[in-house]
Image: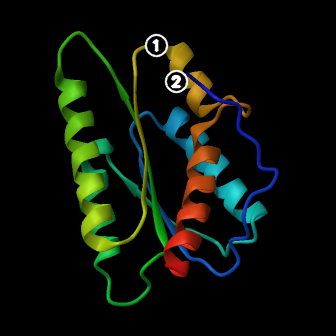
Amino acid sequence: MLTTQSAEGLPSGSEFRFTVVASKYNAIYVDGLVRAALGALQSAGAPDSEVLRVPGSWEIPVVAATVARRSRGRPDAILCFGVIWQGETLHAQHIGDAVSDALMRLAVESGIPVIHQVLTVSTEEQAVARCLNPDTNRGLEAARTALEMARLLRNL
């Protein structure tokens, strides 16, 4: 179920650093997620985020892991964006499951919030609603989660 998203009441992001890792594949939809997230982070006062583009969703975890292992310039949260179309075979499901597992392991092992918005969609309606509709864009949700998790972990 989709929930309406709003940039109102975003926590302050001025003291945090964020990195976005996003797929180039299905760019029209992924770009919508990235734009919404970057706009929300900017509205929250966060400094400009580093944006790293990878060929497809499969490549997101290795780049996110490399960012998390940096000795300098480690972000307070990593936001990951991709769109995988469910087709007639299980290929999309296998990719989605593997990416999800890798991103969760990375978050737990690194202690850096890894915000997962690698979406598996079955229809264009689903993709538009989650990636291009400003009222239900998951990029905004990702930014809010990144801001909240960065603050929570800093205060622990």
Residue plotted at (53% across, 64% down): 149
Q: Residue furthest bottom?
A: 72
Q: Secondary structure beneath disc 1?
A: loop
Q: Secondary structure beneath disc 2?
A: helix
Disc 1 and disc 2 in contact, CB within 8 angstroms: yes
Rendered image quadrant of residue 32: top right
Q: Position of residue 108 (x, y in %)?
A: 29, 64
- On the image, numbered disc 1 is attached to which residue? 123
Rendered image quadrant of residue 65: bottom left
Residue plotted at (59% across, 72% down): 151
Q: Residue furthest right?
A: 8
- Say which amino acid is labelled 2: Ala
Q: Is residue 74 above or below residue 38?
A: below
How many neighbours does mark 1 have within 10 angstroms: few (below 14), some (14-19), or many (20 or more)?
few
Q: Is residue 26 above or below residue 36?
A: above
Q: Position of residue 148 (x, y in %)?
A: 60, 62
Q: Position of residue 92 (x, y in %)?
A: 25, 26
- On the image, numbered disc 2 is attached to which residue? 127
Q: Quadrant of the N terminus?
A: top right
Q: Nearer the viewer, residue 58 or 110?
A: 110
Q: Is residue 119 left or right of residue 56?
A: right
The disc placed on residue 6 is none
Q: Position of residue 147 (x, y in %)?
A: 61, 64
Q: Is residue 151 left or right of residue 67?
A: right
Residue plotted at (41% across, 45% down): 24
How many neighbours does mark 2 have within 10 angstroms: few (below 14), some (14-19), or many (20 or more)?
many
- Say which amino acid is labelled 1: Thr
Q: Is residue 103 left or right of residue 35?
A: left
Q: Nearer the viewer, residue 116 or 88?
A: 116
Residue plotted at (18% across, 24% down): 91
